[in-house]
Image (spheres, grey):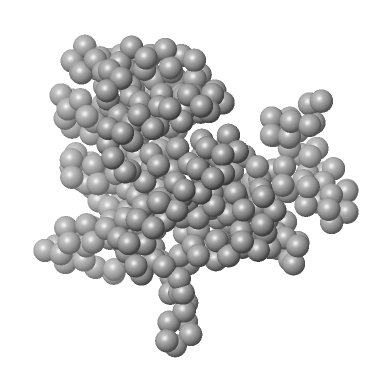
Amino acid sequence: MIPQRVRDGDVTTFIYESIATGKYTEVIEFLRPKSQTHFNSQAVQSVLGWCYVAQQDYVNAADCYERLTSIQPDNNSYWQHYAQCLSKAGFPSEALKIVNFVAARSDPETIAILKASIRFQEQEPRECKAILEKCSQKNPTVLRNLGCAHFQAKEYPEAAARFSQALAITGFQPSLTYALAVTHFEMRDFRQTAKLLNDIISKALSADPGLAPPFQTATETTRTFKNTPALQDSCLIEAYNLKAAMEFQTMNYEAARAVIGNIPPRHEEEIDMITLHNKAILDAENNPDEGIEILTHIVSQPAYPKETLANLVIMYFREELFDVAADFMAENIELCFTQLPEVRK
């Protein structure tokens, strides 16, 4: 709920406490009207842009950073954030124009990393790698991004090597450790995957023991958690989901359900698509109708786990809903062509 009124002296406290607890929507709802009346306010536009990025709403974030480049045209950071948001919003050509515009007055390696990021968003791992390989190989950001480019190209041993090199420089970082775990998962090295995931989980629970099960309170109600920056940075939810996927791959279905049950409960609107997908798959045997409903909802979203469409079609067939499957595939021919490899054979 948005407070009916925040006193002038409490605005800063309200905004930063809301951000700290992951209430980005509340901040956006509070600041959006002010962004129209305080169009040239650097503070309003920068906080609003940051919250949009946190919600992965890169179109609106790009609008904020575009305005900030007008307010402070000499601030290279705003131009760079503007380019990043344009790229992630699906406008790589426009992003590249911005990068080239500020290239002469910016750090060359920063510009190279931005250009590589744009190529990555365009699904061009070869070009991405070519740019990054000319950068310092002692820069952990360069090594991490090279790992992502190798991963995108399905060069998993090379990706693992790059992620490991980056970790050797930075020390433990949840996101880098998770990237390495995903890479070992793709190589079917489940032993190393489990080791890395357990490291992420143990460190997250050590930092905040309240995230550990059981989640029932003394009054038998279930505690729920917000998607706070701390929870997101810990990669705890991602680690549980990948661990469940690993158990599922090895047909340890009960173990997979137990892992999913360890995920801190959140309100429905805050549950990520991967968790929804995995719960639907694991519960499909007992409740196939609900599983189909959930997967149908997921594939209607702008972005969703790549496995969802195939699993939805499989569920239709398993439940002998052949007409429904045929209608769905006819209505989504292009998606089926790109996401169901067997259709192309």
The image shows residue 65 at horizontal and vertical percentages of 28, 34
Where is 254 relative to 90, above or below?
below
**In front: 275, or 10?**
275
Q: Position of residue 232 (x, y in %)?
A: 38, 52
Dividing the picture into quadrants, the one containing residue 85 is top left
Q: Is residue 271 above or below residue 338?
A: below
- Nearest to the observer: residue 105 or residue 211: 211
Residue 297 seen from this side: no
The image shows residue 5 at horizontal and vertical percentages of 24, 68
> Does 106 appear above or below 68?
above
Identify which residue is drawn at 69% across, 34% down: 339
Q: Residue furthest left?
A: 9
- Identified at 39% across, 66% down, the residue is 211
* Residue at image location 61% in from the left, 61% down from the top: 255
Q: Count the marks: how many?
A: 0
Residue 188 visible in rendering: yes
Left or right: residue 14 versus residue 280 is left
In which quadrant is the N terminus drawn? bottom left
Give the residue at x 49% y 62%.
263
Camera-nearest residue between 299 and 147 = 147
Residue nearest the viewer, comparing 35 with 180? 180
Considering every residue shown, the one lying at the far front of the view is 191
Q: Quick check: 121 left or right of 171?
A: right
